[in-house]
Image (cartoon, rainbow, N blue to C red):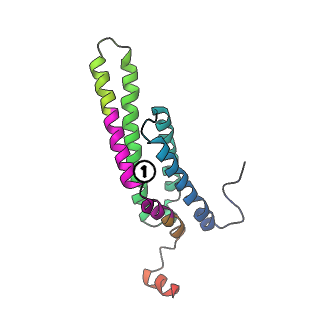
Amino acid sequence: MKALWKDSLTLRDNLQRRMPKLARRYFDKGDKALAEGTDWEEMHQFRLQTKRFRYTLETFRELYGPGIEKRIDSLKKVQTYLGDINDCIVTAKLLKSSKDSADVHGKLEAKAAKLTEKLRQYWADTFTPARARATWTQYLVTYACRPTSIPRSHRLAARK
């Protein structure tokens, strides 16, 4: 198995190398999982991937600036949608065999479909524009292990 983390690199270098790749892979998987006609199992796998990606960002949150919180929050929103859809689908499956649950079953399926459309719209608005993705990956490179104790004016002066 290929090593994901290189011991010969600094923490910052490893983060700058790995985190943008993780983000790009996550976006690609999201595009596939949230495409029209995708079955729930593939969306459920994406739910698990969202959780892993979010937890990875949270693991390194102290090494990034405050902008990481906005990114983590956007993943939480995706997770919430996927979790709510999962609840509807699982409950509908449980009720399917019950004789007098057709009405509730239908409402749960409709709710899952409505939530899926809302999620697809949120994904399109938040993650699909190329600029949004470039901003994510640029942030993950630029702010990895960025010193926060140095005043901004000093950091700007150091660049000149």
Identify which amino acid the numbered label 1 is placed on.
Leu
Magenta stretch prevailing secondary structure:
helix
Q: Quick check: can you spot residue 31?
A: yes
Q: What element carries label 1?
A: helix
**Which of these two is toward me, 152 or 42?**
42
- In the image, residue 67 above or below residue 28: below
Corner quadrant of residue 131? bottom left
Q: Quick check: can you spot residue 51?
A: no
**Which of these two is toward me, 101 or 35?**
35
Give me the residue at 51% from left, 88% from top: 160
**Which of these two is toward me, 25 or 147?**
25
Q: Is residue 25 left or right of residue 123?
A: right
Give me the residue at 50% from left, 66% from top: 138
Residue 92 position within the rendered picture, expressed as x and y whole percent measured from the top left: 36, 24
Is 134 colored magenta in this rendering? yes
Give me the residue at 49% from left, 41% from top: 46
Residue 88 position within the rendered picture, expressed as x and y whole percent measured from the top left: 36, 30
Residue 43 position within the rendered picture, expressed as x and y whole percent measured from the top left: 46, 38
- Outermost residue toward the front? 36
Which residues are drawn in magenta?
112-137
Q: Name the residue under label 1.
A: 75
**Which of these two is toward me, 151 or 121?**
121
- In the image, residue 25 above or below residue 42: below
